Image (cartoon, rainbow, N blue to C red):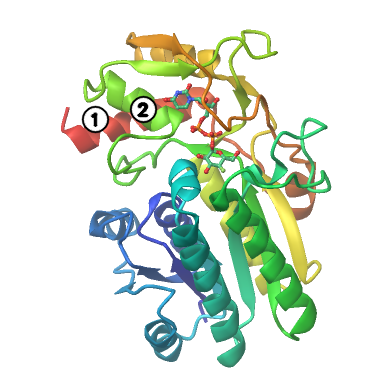
Amino acid sequence: MKKTVLVSGGAGYIGSHTAVELVAAGYNVVIADNLSNSDRSGVEGVRRITGVEVPFVEVDCCDKAAFAKLFEQYAFDSVIHFAAFKAVGESVADPMKYYRNNLLSMMNVVDLMREYGRHNIVFSSSATVYGEADELPVTERTPRKPATSAYGNTKQMCEDILRDAVAAYDGLRGIALRYFNPIGAHPSALIGELPRGVPQNLVPYITQTAAGVRECLSIFGDDYPTEDGSCLRDYIDIVDLAKAHVAAIDRMVTGDGENYEIFNVGTGRAVSVFELVRTFERVNDLSLNYKVAPRRAGDVVAVWADTERANKVLGWRAERSLDETLRSAWAWERYVRKL
Ligand code: UFG
């Protein structure tokens, strides 16, 4: 019988791509989302791509009683918990909003998994837990640095909640996936990132500038101690990232590995902001309006992944090229804007 996976936050950017890959890998999927930072088009996109009427339940994971109904209705044994707020700046301005939402929903997932006798949890963590790392690339054993935002702190705290819960309660297993910088869109251009308001992240800002929605991209700093003076990141294709979740679920379903595990999900390649912009221009044959602006508060100079553990242990590796990913990002923006 096909196994079922609950995808919380499944209408969002990473969740919707993951739902597609889970269905492609033979899983049944149930999507739960409160649509606070996404909309039904994400679910519709998943259904169109897969040809499967994937069930969608509009629910807030912080509302335990409402969330519990989903556990009564569906016999999933695994959950991938994406549902969370994710804007770094907003979390500094309103930390309690982040602690309440991100921690409570995580605790509800753990509690309900126990109460209903379910087993496997994959948690959406982030490379933000490494901060300004002392060693690069970062491995999963690289010490975490104190978080510089409430958002980053919730990622660390949720990892710890999962680790401690798994250690204490029999039958519970957890995997934390530390994402680097997810970019791009599904090759069908039917799902992608839908930022509300002014994009905070680099690639949506680039595509909106190319589309004429934003006038000019600001490159935050050209005086960092890197080759071209801009920051270095590990940009991971969204479909590759989605497939890492399938590998994590496969691993837990087959009972391999330790009860709590952590994997970096990146490409292992450091790309500068200038290099990303130039690549976007080249592969899409356009020229982008950009200027150099002051550094952005809170940015680390460089972070990229050592992916050996994910490659060897999880049996997963990033496959899509940066060229292909940046073409998909532009195709998605054109689809959204009907260009
Ligand atoms: N940048 C610009 N101009 C922009 C936006 C970004 O130059 O308009 C630069 C940033 O300064 C940085 C790089 O592009 O050097 C990437 O910035 P993003 O905002 O796209 O991504 P971050 O690396 O800051 O943060 C991302 C996620 C976080 C996550 C973090 C993990 O947004 O949620 O990666 O390292 F925590």
Q: What is the secondary structure assignment of the residue under circle 1?
A: helix
Classify 253 as above or below 293: below
Which residue type carries mark 2?
Tyr
Residue 337 in picture, x, y percent from top left: 19, 33
User: In the image, residue 74 lies at what x, y percent?
Assistant: 43, 85
Q: Position of residue 129 (x, y in %)?
A: 68, 47
Q: Distance between the Cα atoms at labels 1 and 2?
A: 14 Å
Residue at (74% x, 44% y) in the render:
145
Task: Check mark 2 vs ligand 1: CB closer than 8 Å? yes or no.
Answer: yes
Residue at the image point whose x is 48% and y is 86% from the top: 75
Up/down of 97 relative to 209, above or below: below
- Which residue corresponds to the image point at 47% horizontal and 56% vertical from the top-left? 18
Question: Of the residues shown, which amino acid type is indicated by label 1?
Answer: Arg
Find disc 2 in the rendering and name its residue.
205
Residue 154 visible to an observer of this rendering: yes
Residue drawn at (58%, 84%), measured in percent from left and top?
Answer: 111
- Please, what secondary structure does the residue beneath circle 2 have? helix
Task: Quarter of the image for the C terminus: give it.
Answer: top left
Residue 334, disc? 1
Q: Nearer the viewer, mark 1 or mark 2?
A: 2
Residue nearer the viewer, 97 or 111: 97
